[in-house]
Amino acid sequence: QVQLVESGGGLVQAGGSLRLSCAASGSIFTTNAMGWHRQTPGKRRELVARITSGGSPNYADSVKGRFTISRDNAKNTVYLQMNSLKPEDTAVYYCFALGITQKFTDFASWGQGAQVTVSS
């Protein structure tokens, strides 16, 4: 079983910055893609950013140039640096990880969610 624990959410004024972290632990052989989705009430969860094991990132158009995703493979941890935050970035942010367990089965795990609130 693989668990993801998030940290770093909070309240910030528009234009400010926050950094989210997500650490994966458990029966991990290797992690492949890791990333972040976000969700607001009444809307579908949307992909914010993802990063491959080799470090190649992809971003939603709405966050390009403002958010940066990175990872530390040795720690099985993914980060999301969020700059120039806007009120429309307010959401619950969920990290995810895809990979292979030590029993050589696939896993897809989600974090518990971190609230990010941006005030205008």
Image (cartoon, rainbow, N blue to C red):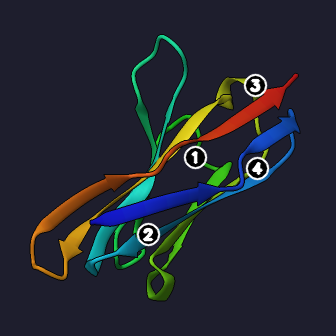
Q: Position of residue 75 (x, y in %)?
A: 50, 83
Q: Which residue has dot 2 on it? A: 24
How far apart marks 2 and 3 lie (CA) works out to: 29 Å
Q: Which residue has dot 1 on it? A: 64
Side of 28 where 34 appears, left or right? right
Amino acid carrying label 1: it is Lys
Mark 3 packing: few (<14 Cα in 10 Å), some, or many (20+)? some
Which is more N-terminal, label 2 or label 1? 2
How far apart marks 1 and 4 lie (CA) works out to: 10 Å
Side of 49 where 63 appears, left or right? right
Amino acid carrying label 3: it is Pro
Which is more N-terminal, label 4 or label 1? 1
Element on which disc 3 rests: helix
Q: Position of residue 79 (x, y in %)?
A: 59, 64
Q: Which residue has dot 4 on it? A: 83
Which is more N-terminal, label 3 or label 1? 1
Q: Which residue has dot 3 on it? A: 87
Q: Indicate the quadrant containing the C terminus: top left, top right, bottom left or bottom right.
A: top right
Mark 2 packing: few (<14 Cα in 10 Å), some, or many (20+)? many
* Along the line of sight, the residue nearer the viewer: 13 or 110: 110
Residue at the image point whose x is 28% and y is 71% from the top: 32
